[in-house]
Image (cartoon, rainbow, N blue to C red):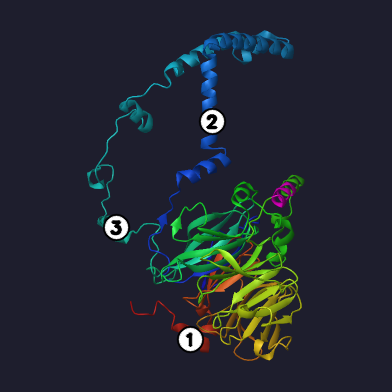
Amino acid sequence: GGGLRVLGTKVQHKETMITSIAWVPVGVPTENPRRAEVPDEELDPAFVLAGGLEGESDRSDSDERDVSCSEGNDEAKLSDERRTFNTSTTENARNVTGNYSRLRDLSPPARTLGAGLDEAMAALNMEKYDDEDDAHTRAARLFGAGRTTFYANNDDDPHITIKDDEDVFEEDYPDDFTIRHTDLVLLAARTDVDVSHLEVYVYEEAVLNGTEDCNLYCHHDLLLPAFPLSVSWLARPHSLQEEQTANCVAIGTMYPGIEIWNLDLIDAVEPVVTLGGFKRCAATTGPKDSKFHDEESDHALGGSAPDPVWTSSSKQKKRKQKQRKQLNNSELQKDSHTDAILGISWNSQHRNVLASASADHTVRIWDLLTQSTQQILTHHSDKVQAVEWNPTEPSVLLTGGFDKNVAVIDARDSRNASMKWKVGADVECAIWNLGSPTQVIVSDENGSVTCFDSRKGECSNPIFELSAHKKAATCLSISPGAPSLLVSASTDKTLKLWDISIGEPKLIAQKDPEIGALFTAVFSPSVPYLIGCAGAKGEVAVWDIMSEKSVADGCHGVLLERYNRAAMPR
């Protein structure tokens, strides 16, 4: 349909999915991300774990010692091996066929194999293998022995017959890694069968990129240690005094640690900070999946992950059991969650503060500067799925869990300043109503969406309750540019856009992005008429709601038109 841009093929990859996405504010990413430099002292242990360089070096040393001890016996051993090979080959041939002359017609006679080996060794000239080649020989080996000609530029090369003047201007063809200040960046946590990574996408709106079509492509990615569940962009401060911040992302996985990565680094091999988690030796040598993978994944993704990901052969089950046993024996850091990280929320007003929700039934509030826990909240009796800071009251936190409770807590007095409401099923998502920041909106596993007002007190009746989807309503998001617009995503494969300006929500648009069951959907904070979504097919889609007549022609279209960058003077 119109207004929808999908990245990826239309073929469903059942063993690939995207579980969480997040937008980066426009203009924040650096124009030319730099490549990470890895110190040698960090490479050595990595190669050892991979059976790489250091292990090969050890084997080479051992081989050299073996060679030095046995050089005198090489010829004798070779002669013995030839005699043994010739004899065994001949005897086996006679036993199998009973007719040596027939075997001779089918393959080379055994008596010639020894001579053939001598000829092959002579051709290889192994005695001079380690001798230094001259420059001409090395060049011939690399580029071929024929005549090689180099030209200083394309104009001098007679083989290039089309001389295009436009190629001279580099600004017309910027480097592939350049991110323009108008580009939108979208983060997506992808999982394949045995590999998980964070993908950094660039979205170019139509007209702004000089064409009539929008463009969405993967800029680079980061390898993750385990199945990712939650992603939150953050501007990580260097100190409380400095205004300078780093463009980062916090990622929660099936492991109990929270990894913070610098998004302006290409090919980074490790996060800049890890909050909690396993001790380094356990994290680097542990298995790819955590002990919580089989047990929690279905809940974390709304109860309907593609079957091939979670059902495996007996061999795979045995491997997972072995991995769980290894992780049970792994040692956690003292200041850490003890189970998977299901939700993360960065406090944009107190930039050094991060909240995390975990399957260990707790919520932790972290100080990014000291990399330590400041508070541990234990008000839920089951896994905590959702967490979000209030946009106007930075000390107030919203949480939701599998105990079917949603809670509002003031972190300054968490024991006394708190209230709870009950919903009909496990909480999938909980957000603040941007148009009325005292209200919370909750979606659950049954597909219901419910709104409560904290001013009415604990256990008060809902403002509205809506059966939004036939299956789990996995995600909610409100447009920052039109706060009465709410989008809901579901494992029924649909996105629904609701007008919540009046008491009962009104459905004004609906979209099937054709990317399977939806696990996540988020409005762009910079261009609030764009919705990014992803799910079970492992594809990312962007829905431009201004392409919907019901939105563009209504009161919401007037509000959102102010953010239409194509209409802005440039």
Magenta segment range?
Answer: 321-329
Please provide percent x and percent y for residue 467.
72, 81
Give 25 or 46, whichever is nearer the viewer. 46
In the rendered structure, which disc, 1 or 2, sits on the residue that comes first in sequence? Answer: 2
Residue at 51% x, 51% y: name it: 269
User: What is the three-letter code of the residue carrying label 3?
Assistant: Glu
| Secondary structure, magenta segment, majority class | helix
Query: Is label 2 in a helix, a strand or a loop?
Result: helix
Please provide percent x and percent y for residue 520.
61, 69
The relative height of residue 17 versus residue 429 in the rendered view (above or below) is above
Q: Residues within 10 Å of mark 1 (few under 14, many from 20)?
A: some
> Where residue 170 is drawn, which disc sits there?
3
Relative placement, left or right, of 319 versus 412 is right
User: Residue 109, can we see it?
Assistant: no
The relative height of residue 288 versus residue 262 in the rendered view (above or below) is above
Relative placement, left or right, of 401 versus 71 is right
What residue is pinned by disc 1? 559
Q: Does 325 lie within the magenta span?
A: yes
Q: Where, by quadrant of the figure, is residue 76 drawn? A: top right
In the rendered structure, which disc, 2 or 3, sits on the residue that comes first in sequence? Answer: 2
Query: Is label 1 in a helix, a strand or a loop?
Result: helix
Give 455 or 30, whichever is nearer the viewer. 455
Q: Does 253 lie within the magenta span?
A: no
What residue is pinned by disc 2? 58
Q: Residues within 10 Å of mark 2 (few under 14, many from 20)?
A: few
Please provide percent x and percent y for residue 118.
51, 12
User: What is the three-letter code of the residue carrying label 2?
Assistant: Asp
